[in-house]
Amino acid sequence: MKHPLNDFRYCTCNPYSGFFSQDCYDSNGEIIHSQEAIEYVAGIRKMNEDKPKEQLEAQWIEGNGRTPGVYKNGKKIETLPRLNFMQPVPNSYVAKEDLPAYRFLSQLKKEGIEISDEILNETPFRVSKAWFELLSGYREKPEAILSKRFETEQSSMVVVKDIPFVSFCEHHLLPFMGTAVFGYIPKDNKVVGISKIPRLIQCFAKRLQLQERMTDQITKSFFEIVQPHGCMCITTASHTCSEIRGVKAIGSKTIASSIQGTFNDEKVRQEFLTHAAR
């Protein structure tokens, strides 16, 4: 999607989130803080404001290390800020009409549902920022979370239990929430920090998900990156998509499990289940 450079909001932030989205650097490789980033882009805008819009465009490109930039005749001539820490920007830099929640609320209002101007003006920003946080798992990398190893004499099973998570059903965009228990057997006396296991679970939970797939992603990524003898994860969750709508099975629980490596052995698996039940 391309927009004229003079349309300032598209030069400074992702219009669908209302946030900056990756680290911002100047030409010397130094990090630019949010206000400096705004001023930096404003400088680029002023420098080029006398150029024809058809020759000068700003393009927002998300993810994969690619950067938004100023393009002339198809060639990038300036790089725009990249911010990784998801800092919110003033609402004045984002057009509420560009936010999906605004279009949704506007449609409800057209259909006769009473929605105040205050809700229409403020809620779209709050919703966009909330979803940006709730789906932050897409911006996490398991390789980075599990990059650190510690030498230890530990060679027996490590189990972390009662790890809370909240995720979102990809079919209805409604939350499912519960707890996870995760265990692994270290190889070559190398372990990961205990906090990294809840972080890995949050990485896959904060996405649009299926509980079964999420549980499998947790063990597969850990097994591939850390390379233990084996690992296992069990998740237990309540799904609001089946509690507040449809069958309305209030209080029902769903359990999913995933096994890698030596945990396929019944004796090893039983040891894990004993720890999980304590």
Image (spheres, rainbow, N blue to C red):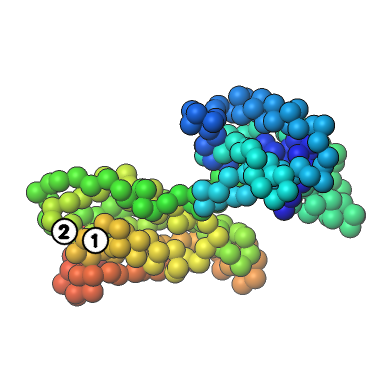
Q: Which residue is mark 2?
A: 187
**In the rendering, at what x and y percent does residue 165 appear?**
45, 52
**In the rendering, at what x and y percent does residue 244 appear?**
63, 62
Q: Quadrant of residue 34?
A: top right
Residue drawn at point x = 36 percent, y = 48 percent: 145
For the residue pair 137 and 212, the one nearer the viewer reads as 137
Contact check, label 1 and label 2, Cβ < 8 Å: yes
| Residue 8 visible | yes
Name the quadrant of the C terminus. bottom left
Q: Which residue is mark 1?
A: 227
| Residue 18 visible | no
Q: Amino acid at mark 1?
A: Gln
Up-down relation of residue 244 to residue 37 (above or below): below
**In the rendering, at what x and y percent does residue 185 appear?**
19, 60
Numbered badge on residue 188: none
User: Which one is earlier in the sequence, the residue at label 1 or at label 2?
Assistant: 2
Secondary structure under tag 2 reads: loop
Image side of residue 90 versus residue 175, left or right: right
Up-down relation of residue 245 to residue 206 (above or below): below
Task: Give the distance between the C-alpha atoms of the residues marked 1 and 2, in whole angstroms.
Answer: 7 Å
For the residue pair 117 and 113, the one nearer the viewer reads as 117
Secondary structure under tag 1 reads: loop
For the image shown, how many numbered marks are present on the structure?
2
